[in-house]
Amino acid sequence: MNPTDTSAPSNFIHEMIEKDLETGRFDGRVQTRFPPEPNGYLHIGHAKSIVLNFGIAQKYNGKCNLRFDDTNPTKEEEEYVRSIIEDVRWLGYDWGERIFYASDYFDQLYKWAVQLIETGHAYVDDLSAEEIRAYRGTLTEPGKNSPYRERSVEENLDLFERMRAGEFPNGAKVLRAKIDMASPNMNLRDPVLYRILHAPHHRTGDKWCIYPMYDFAHGQSDSIERVTHSICTLEFENHRPLYDWLLDTLGIYHPQQIEFARLNLSYTVLSKRRLIELVENSYVNGWDDPRMPTLSGLRRRGVPPEAIRSFAERIGVARNDSIIDVSLLEYHIRQDLNKRAERRMAVLHPLKIIITNYPEGQVEMLEAVNNPEDESAGKRTVPFSRELYIERRDFNEDPPRKYFRLAPGREVRLRYGYFVTCTNVVKDEHGEIIEVHCTYDPETKGGYAPDGRKVRGTIHWVSAAHAINAEVRLYDRLFTKHNPLDAEEGKDYKDYLNPNSLEVLAGCKLEPSLSEARPGERFQFERLGYFSVDPDTTEGRLVFNRTITLRDTWAKIEKQQRK
Ligand code: ATP
Ligand code: MG
């Protein structure tokens, strides 16, 4: 995929909606919904669905609901509800008053279950979960009818009522749709609609001890909300006949279910179950660890929501599963930050240089451009003095060919400052370089020599006396494998965790204007990458996250590996 191709990606869902608008199928309405189950934090795969559903509402002057699919009280929590609300807002979407919970529909869903029993379309089954599985048959063999399938309507009504009243333990009975145990579609082989679960629900408390299954709750919730286009991922394609059967059999308003391919991203995993595993076993530092593909992790890392939106729009939707290269997401992050992030100077691995001919005690305020991509960002001043820090790797005592930075006898430009020439190297008793001595040319202020002489290298720096200290956290990909789920025999995705995905640098030196930086603010550290202020920052302790490097170093590494 060419990342610079900005033509609108083809979107078969838009085409379907436009056709429905033309034929007046839903009276010209467009109503979508984003239906997360509050059993984990949202990840970038969910962002694809959010951008799609809310984007469609915006494009066609429709509405998009936020609906919590909260039918499983044992896995769902209020914390997840809160985080999901925060993340969808952060992405830039607004559902107005239209926030809903499937649990608000439990009374209606119960009535519909009774209706199915009364019309002979559902029955109470005493088979155990294991027996139900055994009776279900396989893809090549039809299933067998349960011995309880022919119970009378009266008996079913009585048993279902008693299930609700709490007379039976978990698993003793279920309510099943009576469809066809020989259907080639396994989902139509008398699917379970309700199960007994003596567990309090985070919203309905102890009111219920039977809970609807996903398939029974989802379509009916869509119907209640008068959703027009119920967009979901491909694994639900085989559920669509059941979705349709339930709505038709109940004789209620019938939305159109449409499936699209879920987002998979290289070098990470997008599945709540696995992300929970990473969090609970402390492979990462929580859901918002900046290495996580969660929206809260990306936010903490400094990724702007606009970059996620433009990425999601760029990849579009398709009907076939594929893995999108994470470098495409990184491209969108760089594009966005390049426009908005102000430039600053920061030294991550400091080496002191002393400008021996610069007057002791003198300080000059030099002018620096905040963002060459955005003139309105203005300018700032940075202090220059006799002692500075530069990056260790910007000095080389024995420079290889094509090394144009500082080296003995070499002249380089200090960004926004002067030309300096290295005159001497000071080492400690172990031979470690502790200081580099230079002279500067006072005629070169602003970075140009009046005699027209050129230097090949420009390096950044921070005045030692004015520098502020910071901790900087560098992140790399969380996994070393393109598709961690494609594990070798006897391994699993966790065996491909990158042991070097986090590097913490203490004692980094920043230009003093950054002392005012607040959590969430983003900067480009010149020549180093984009960085954002971490919420761990407190008075007197500044912590930065590297959001992303300036260039795609991985593309290079992968190219070399392929050779
Ligand atoms: P996971 O597989 O990560 O556990 P899920 O599908 O169980 O996710 P839900 O809370 O049910 O998570 O998802 C809410 C919505 O987000 C659903 O409509 C689902 O189809 C969509 N969604 C989830 N993962 C992805 C993905 N990787 N790409 C696109 N859409 C996704
Ligand atoms: Mg799900």
Image (cartoon, rainbow, N blue to C red):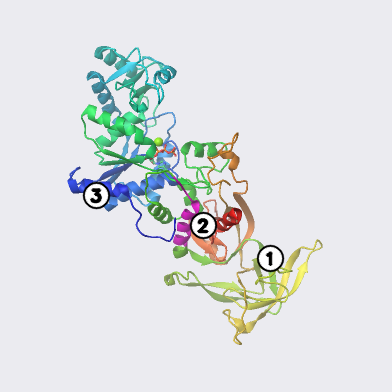
For residue 308, above or below residue 490: below
Residue of label 2: 532
Q: Which residue is mark 3?
A: 18
Q: Earlier in the sequence, mark 3 or mark 1?
A: 3
Compared across the picture, whether 33 is left or right of 431 comes to left
Quarter that holds the N terminus: bottom left
Give the vertical position of 230 relative to 396 (above or below): above
Q: Under tag 2, what secondary structure? A: strand
Q: Nearer the viewer, residue 69 or 455?
A: 455
Is label 3 in a helix, a strand or a loop? helix
Secondary structure found at label 1? strand
The type of residue carrying mark 2 is Ser
Q: Which residue is mark 1?
A: 351
Q: Is residue 491 above or below residue 142?
A: below
Query: Residue 50 at what x, y percent from top left?
Result: 36, 46
- Secondary structure mostly seen in magenta is helix
Q: Is residue 473 visible?
A: no
